[in-house]
Amino acid sequence: MTEKDHTVNQTEEEVNSKESEDNQTFENNEESVDHTDKNEVKDNQLQDDSEETDQQEDVDPKDEKIQELEKLANDNEEKYLRLYAEFENYKRRIQNENQINKTYQAQGVLTDILPSIDNIERALQIEGDDESFKSLQKGVQMVHESLLRALKDNGLEEIQAEGQEFDPNLHQAVVQDDNPDFKSGEVTQELQKGYKLKDRVLRPSMVKVNQ
């Protein structure tokens, strides 16, 4: 081997040794950095845990009790308001029902007495020349008028029929008529009187309707 070759080999060995040293230094630096990062993370976690523990220790038991009582008070207030609203609705419903019952309380009696009124009116249509008959008829007429007056004071109303336009809510058509004195659809004759209590029909009028 020449002196030149020996020098080249020596130089390569020195370069390889230098590279090996540099690699070892880099690896050592990486391990040092990684170890430092892990220590920092651990320190931060310990600090957070310490702060959370401090916050928990700072909570006053009295404050917790106050929060519980405030929540309970809010819940009770909500229940009270809901029950109060339900009670008000119930009270209004009862008042409306009582008002309706008061308005139509005579309905049953009036409905039951309508056939008697019909019979009295039929009796008044009978004619006679005898003085005793006329006297009796006059007495019956007075009773009829007195009875109608008392019933009207309790809300009874007669339904207007003859000459009125036929209304299926108030009239019951039983016969079709052909009368030139009336327009088409008008009631030409009332066969039986109809009555209502306030705005409630007790019995519709039985009528003839012009075609």
Image (tube, rainbow, N blue to C red):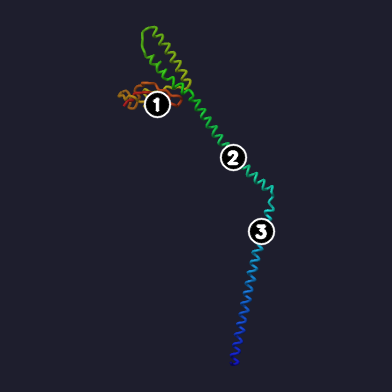
Q: Which residue appears at 63% of the width and 69% of the height?
A: 34
Q: Residue at x 36, y 13 (%)?
A: 126
Quote the CA–CA distance across marks 2 and 3.
Answer: 41 Å
Q: CA distance from mark 1 to mark 3?
A: 86 Å
Say which element carries label 2. Answer: helix
Among numbered discs 1 and 3, the one appearing first in the sequence: 3
Do tag 1 and tag 3 residues touch (Cβ < 8 Å)?
A: no
Labelled pair 1, 2 in contact (Cβ < 8 Å):
no
Where residue 49 sits in the image (x, y, percent)?
66, 58
Give the crowd class for mark 1: few <14, some 14-19, many >=20 residues within 10 Å.
many
On screen, residue 93 above or below 15: above
Disc nearer the start of the sequence (2/3): 3
Q: Which label was assigned to residue 81?
A: none
Residue 79 picture location, percent across and down: 59, 40
Give the amino acid at mark 2: Lys
Query: Above or below — where is 117 with respect to 12?
Result: above
Q: Is residue 111 left or right of residue 89?
A: left
Q: Name the residue nearer the viewer: 14 or 157.
A: 14
Q: Which mark is residue 49?
A: 3
Where 159 sits versus 140, above or below?
A: below
Between 173 and 72, the one nearer to me in the picture = 72
**Mark 1 and mark 2: span between their CA atoms?**
49 Å
Looking at the rendered structure, the kind of residue marked 3 is Asp
Three-letter amino acid code of the residue under disc 1: Leu
Quarter of the rendering containing residue 86: top right
Disc number for residue 170: 1
Q: Which residue is mark 2?
A: 79
